[in-house]
Every structure is written in C-alpha cells, then in structure tokens.
Image (cartoon, rainbow, N blue to C red):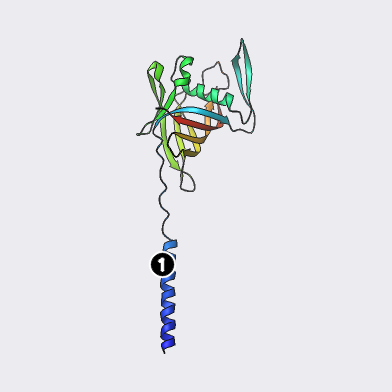
C-alpha cells in the first residue's frame, strides 16, 4: 500500500511539473521593442542593389552630356545621385547639397531641410512597421516627388538602428530616380531602384 501511495505521489509530482513546463512553453513572446528614428539624418552612403546596370541619359560630364551607366554594387555614383535627388528637393543651390538633411518627426511627418537656405519642405510621411516575423524592421515612406502630386511609396527593409542611436541602415525598395538627368522628375521621367542606405544623425 505504501508503494502504491509513493507511486501515486510521484506521478502527481511529474504531472504538476509537466503542466508548469507546458504553461511556460505557451507563454506569448514579449513584444519587440519599437525603434524610434525621430530626428534629423544625413545620407552617408547608398549602394545600388540591382541585377543589371542602371542608365541615366543626358548626364553632364565636363562639357558633354553622356549616358551614365551605374553598375550593380556601385556606391560612389549611387550615393551622389541619391543624395543629390534628396537634397535637390529642398536646396536651390547645389553647393548646399552637402548640408541637406531629412527629418522624421514624432507625429509621422517627413521633412526635407536645407539649413543654409533656411528651407524646410514637408515632403511626406513615415512609419515603422513589423515584418512577417513580427519584428520592427521596416520603414514605410510616402514621399511627394516633383510636381506630380502623386506620393511615391518607398519601403525600407532590414531597417536597423545602431546601438548608440547615431545611425541606421536599410534597403530601400522603390526609390525614385530620373531616367533623363536634364528633365524634371515626373510620371514620364522616373525609374525605380533598390539601394542599401546608411544615414547618420545630424546634431
């Protein structure tokens, strides 16, 4: 009888521990921390992520207009073009492009700033959203491009902020770029590229 009692007690203990283990296993995963990229940011680099070479017509080179090829994996030309396209939306003088920054405000607005010219353009909206795995790795940008009045949707995937909060990286899909350099960007003069971007905080 004692042996039966001990066996029953032992089975009860195993049952209780099994239930505890099962309950722990079914606890919901903690909510991932949502990054806060609000602030002013300057483009540090942009690398073309495309399978084929990108071409831009009528690009000024010395005294000529050329067809500029941008090979996949290029950083130098891509940084110049992406940075110039951003800065040109706010700065009138190209010599001020290097001081351009974009600003993500706490209320979801996207601002383009040209400090030397005291210009701030409200250029769209932004939001950080979850990916398919439930992690906050995507920034959605709705950007007003040129005079078309039609916002362009840019998705920045693999978004990651540095531990010190002073930079972030991501892959922009659907970034608008002109086909013809001497013609204003618009519905008939636009192509879309994918680019790895790095931005640094502006003090």
Picture quadrant where residue 71 is located: top right
The image shows residue 48 at horizontal and vertical percentages of 58, 30
Q: Is residue 64 left or right of residue 39?
A: right
Q: Is residue 121 left or right of residue 173?
A: left
Q: Looking at this rendering, what residue extends furthest in the front direction?
A: 164
Q: Looking at this rendering, what residue extends furthest in the bottom direction?
A: 1
Neighbourhood count class around disc 1 (C-alpha, 10 Å): few under 14, some 14–19, many 20 upward: few
Q: How many marks?
A: 1
The image shows residue 201 at horizontal and vertical percentages of 43, 30
Q: Which residue is mark 1?
A: 20
Q: Looking at this rendering, what residue extends furthest in the top direction?
A: 63
On screen, residue 157 above or below 6: above
Residue 47 visible in the snapshot: yes
Picture quadrant where residue 39 is located: top left
The structure residue drawn at horizontal position 62% and vertical position 20%, both measured from the top left corner, is 68
On screen, residue 60 above or below 163: above
Quadrant of the snapshot with the C terminus: top left
The structure residue drawn at horizontal position 43% and vertical position 34%, both measured from the top left corner, is 166
On screen, residue 59 above or below 127: above
Q: In terms of secondary structure, where does tag 1 sit?
A: helix
The structure residue drawn at horizontal position 37% and vertical position 18%, both measured from the top left corner, is 118
The image shows residue 43 at horizontal and vertical percentages of 48, 27
The structure residue drawn at horizontal position 44% and vertical position 22%, both measured from the top left corner, is 100
The image shows residue 13 at horizontal and vertical percentages of 41, 75
């Amino acid at each position: 009888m004692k042996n039966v009692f001990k066996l029953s007690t032992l089975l009860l203990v195993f049952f209780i521990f099994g239930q505890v283990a099962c309950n722990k296993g079914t606890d919901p995963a903690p909510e991932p921390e949502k990054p806060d990229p609000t602030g002013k940011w300057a483009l540090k680099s942009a690398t073309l992520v495309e399978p084929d070479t990108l071409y831009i017509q009528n690009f000024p080179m010395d005294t000529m207009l050329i067809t500029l090829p941008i090979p996949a994996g290029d950083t130098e030309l891509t940084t110049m073009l992406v940075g110039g396209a951003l800065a040109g939306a706010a700065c009138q003088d190209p010599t001020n492009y290097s001081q351009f920054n974009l600003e993500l405000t706490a209320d979801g607005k996207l601002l383009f700033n040209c400090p030397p010219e005291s210009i701030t353009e409200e250029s769209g909206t932004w939001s950080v959203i979850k990916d398919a795995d439930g992690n906050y790795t995507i920034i959605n940008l709705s950007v007003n491009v040129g005079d078309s009045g039609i916002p362009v949707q840019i998705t920045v995937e693999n978004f990651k902020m540095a531990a010190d909060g002073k930079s972030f990286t991501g892959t922009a899909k659907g970034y608008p770029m002109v086909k013809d350099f001497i013609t204003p960007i618009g519905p008939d003069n636009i192509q879309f590229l994918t680019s790895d971007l790095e931005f640094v905080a502006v003090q």
